[in-house]
Structures are given as structure tokens and as C-alpha cells.
Amino acid sequence: MLILGIETATQQVSVAIGGHEGVLGMFEVSRGRRHAETLVPAIEFLCRQADIEICEFGAIAVDIGPGLFTGMRVGLAAGKAIAQALRVPMIGISSLDLLAFPLRHADRTIAAVIDARKGELFYAFYRPVPGGVQRVTDPQVSSVDDLVADLMARGQNVVCVGDGALRYRDEISSGTMCDFAEQFLSHPSAAPLVQLAHARALREDWVNPRDIQPMYLRAPDAQINWATRAAGRAGGAT
Amino acid sequence: MTADEPLTVTDSTLVLGIETSCDETAAALVMGGYDVVASAVSTQIDLHAQFGGVVPEIASRAHLDLLNPMVARVIVEAGITDDRIDAVACTVGPGLIGALLVGVSAAKALALTWDVPFVGINHMEAHLYAAFLEDPTLEFPMVVLLVSGGHTMLIEMQDHGRYRLLGQTIDDAAGEAFDKVARFLGLDYPGGPAIDREAVHGDPEAINFPRSMLHEGLDFSFSGLKTSVMNYVRKHPDVSTADVAASFQAAVVDVLVTKARRAAEQAGARGLVLGGGVAANSLLRERFLSVCTDAGIQGFLPSRAMCTDNAAMIAAVGWHRLRSDGPTALDAGAYPNLRLQFM
Ligand SMILES: [Zn+2]
């Protein structure tokens, strides 16, 4: 079965096509235009270059976060639309799982850390197991200090991965014995996404596009001020 | 039909419209630019009511949940299969950026999957077209009074795609004034319908609130009116809320219909059309029609459902834009401050 993977939970846009042979093609860019502008043309380009018709996909895999809400929803909205139009199921995988999975050959604990902005981080700990990684803590949103305290409490050598780890590298390394994964691994990628999704597809462990839910971890900021509201309602009804 | 060859836009061209710019998630199928085959709107008012306004993040989250069911519903209601859809039109602005992006991403993905053209639509232009969906015989030139939470504009439509801005608010939009005054009076959100309901029990002549700029030009100002309502209530704490609501509403409506009539007369318009969310206000609807009759101008009042945000108007403009300008590239984004192009 061919799977289309869509990943937009951080500043990177990543699209991959995978099947039982593994990853067949990938497009990835982490600067330049915004997610919504890049994503659909990227899917179109990748399909054309890989000589695959969109109707050949048997499932659509998406990164469900945690991550930056607006970007994450661009991928989810596009993925849900394609799945609905093709009448195929979806597979949702966490951005933190996607960061940890490429480090499965590490011989120690992995901290997957995504920059949540506003001085906070989304993170979870993983341990390598045969064939993959196993998440050992629930994904959470916390301050940098909380992560550092968490790492110190573990008292062991941990490898940190993700744009959050990179951004707060100095704070993290000052009190801990952490190593840091390569920079090019610091955004979740659609390559592990289609790989992990394929394994799930074999077990038919998937969801209806209507039911897939993003992992926000943060309640919506419900502050209203008249200035942003007026802009927001620029097209709005009353 | 594929996106690679130009689409010949005809009376049977079926456009799927998608709208997610603010707090309504909507989809619709419109044939030939006028014929609404199916239309579905899911309003999020209840989600935002407790906050007294639209919370952008809550709106975006709701759009993501609601959009697929809306699209599925109109396809089922129309009794068609997906392959009958010739194009996908979606609001690209103005509106809330996060909310717009949900619709734009989904619409472009649908267009790519179905291999049909995508058309990015200006939400304000769609409001101008709402009237055509109910009366395709409307003739140019016509003047549209567009009143919503974000806009108060008088626009002359000379032809499809040819618009002239005759006047607009220099401060608050009319809908914004309704919301702010309702909030001040302790009435429900949204303020338009709340004041409309409250005003029924009040005397519109109880308080003579100012009619700003009534005799000058075609621009509007509602900020002074809002302030004088607040000052009045502070000075007269025992005043009946219903009287304040009725008198405030009467002042707003007076200004709107007086200027709309002046605009229509100055432009030599064949018709005067009301549009936008505030066009659902009962007093405005009533006064609008009587002013048109007095002035001997053909007045057109779209139904309340067509005045508020919906996707049928998006699909309708989609048909016209596709015919005149062709598809929009798939690398289009969302443009929260998109403006209408005037001549
Ligand atoms: Zn609107």
C-alpha cells in the first residue's frame, strides 16, 4: 500500500511517499514560504516526480503534533481533505515520536523536544527498543527550567533532539550531561512518518479522517482584545 | 475535466465553495454561478459567546473539525458524485489567518486530489454577490450597502468584477458598534441580534442619539455614537435598556439608509442591495425597503441566510472569477487583510 505522509508541525514542511519498500520520495524545506503556500504544490511535485497518481494512495499519514498550531492545522486540513476525497483512512503520529524514531539505535534515553514558543517546550522521553523507540513519559508542555530539572533528575546521559533542544542548547547543557542530535534531525520528518504509518497500516490501525484529532496540549488562548477582534472579523458576520 | 486543460466555464459548471474566514464553517455547491444546489453552514457562535467575541484559536480548531462534514454534507445533499465537481473555490481573505488557512489548505488539497481548478476568493466580493444568488435578474449598475462586524461600505457594482468604493466607515464598523454597545448594556453576544431583540420592547425615539455625518458625504462614523450611548447610560443609570437599545439602533439604521439612498441616487443606480451580517437586523431591513420605495429605486434584500457568512456566495464568485481570470495557483496562501480591488 502506498502512503502519503504530511508533516507541518514545526517550521518545516515535509512530505513523503512510502510503501512496503520503504520511503520512495521526500520533499522537505524549513525556510522560505509559509506552510499553506508550500504544502499542496510540494505534494503535487513529489507525486509527479515519483510518477504516482494521488488516487494510488491507500492511506494518508499526518503529524498530529504537538507543534505550532497554525502550521499543524495546515497539514491536518490538507491530509483530511485528501483522505476524504479518496475515501481512504488516516494514520496520525505524534511529532515527538517522529523526532525520537531516527535515534532508535542510540543506546540511551532520548528526549524529543519541540519549541512551543512563549518560552515553553513540548517534550517526551523515549527509550530504544528492538525495531523502534518506546515513549516512557506523556507528551507535555513545560518551561525550559522544567525540562532541565527533569533531565537532571534522570541523572543519566540523555540525547536531546528537536528544534526546542537546539534553541535552548546552552540552558540544557549547563546543568546536564546531555548530547544533542544532528541539526538535520531537529524537525520531525515525513520519512519516519510514512515508515511508522506503514507498520500501522499493516495492522489496519487507522482512523476515519473525520475522527483524527490534533494533540494541542495547550488550551486556546481566549484573550479577546478589540483590536485583533476587529481585524479578525474583517469578513465576519454579525 | 482536469486542471491541466483550461476549463470552459458554462451554465452547468459546478463549483464547490468553502468558507472559513471567521466563525462560520461552510460549504456549498453552486451551478452556473447562480443556482445553489446545496449549502451547509455550521456556526460557532455558541463556542465564542462566553468570551464576548470570536476567539481566533477556538475558531481555527472548530473549522478543522467541522469542514470535512460540511463538504460531505453538500455532496450528499446534492446527490452527486465527487467527479461532477468542476472547481473548488475558497475564501483566501480577509479574515482570521488561522481560520482562513484551514479552508485554503483543505480546498487546495481537494482541487489537487480531484484534479480540478482552485479559485481563491475575496470574502468581501462574495458578499457583493450574495444578492445575485436569489435574484439573478439584478441589473448593473447597482449600489450595495455592505454592513458587517468588520465593514461598513457603500460600493457601486458597475459590472462583474468592476467596483467603485463610494463610502466607508472612518472608525468602527456598524456591526462592531452593535457588539460594543450590547456588551456595554450587558446584552448577549453577538450584539446585533441581541440589540435587535431588546429594541422590540423599547421606544426608538426615547433618546435622540447623534447621527454622525448624516448630511455630509457617503462615509460613516459610529465611534461617536457608541461613546454617547455610554455617556448617556452613565448619566442616567436608571434608563430602560430597551429604550437605549431601540434608540441606538434607530440612530445606526437612520444613518445607514440615508446614505445608501444618497449613494444610489448619486450613482444613478438601477438597484440598491443590502448585504453583510448586519443586514439581518429587522429595523434595517424594514427601513431599507421603505427608503427604496420612497426613492423609486429597486431595492433588494437577500434572505438572512444569504446576508450572513455562507459558502454559496463564495462558490458563486468562484464561477465568475474562473470565467474571467482562470484558476488560482496552488501556491496561494491566506491573506488576512485582503482588500477589494476598486477602480
Ligand atoms: Zn462576512
Image (cartoon, rainbow, N blue to C red):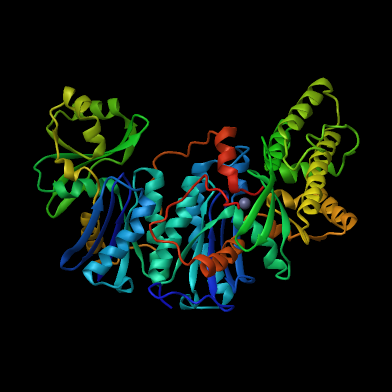
Query: Which residue is depicted at the point 41% across and 61% down?
Result: B329
Query: Which residue is depicted at the point 70% across and 70% down?
Result: B136
Quadrant in the picture for residue B300: bottom right
Where residue B308 sits: x, y (%)? 66, 54
From this viewpoint, is residue A199 visible?
A: yes
Where residue B310 sits: x, y (%)? 61, 59
The quadrant the N terminus of chain B occupies is bottom left
Quadrant in the picture for residue A66: top left
Query: Which residue is depicted at the point 67% across and 47% down?
Result: B148
Q: How many marks?
A: 0
Q: Nearer the viewer, residue B274 or B202?
A: B274
Q: Nearer the viewer, residue A133 or B311?
A: B311
In screen coordinates, is B249 left or right of B162?
right
Using the image, determine if residue A93 lies above or below residue B210: below
From this viewpoint, is residue A211 visible?
A: no
Where residue B166 sits: x, y (%)? 70, 48
Where residue B301 sits: x, y (%)? 77, 59
Q: Nearer the viewer, residue B93 or B212?
A: B212
In screen coordinates, is A135 left or right of B303?
left
Using the image, determine if residue B181 lies above or below residue A9: above
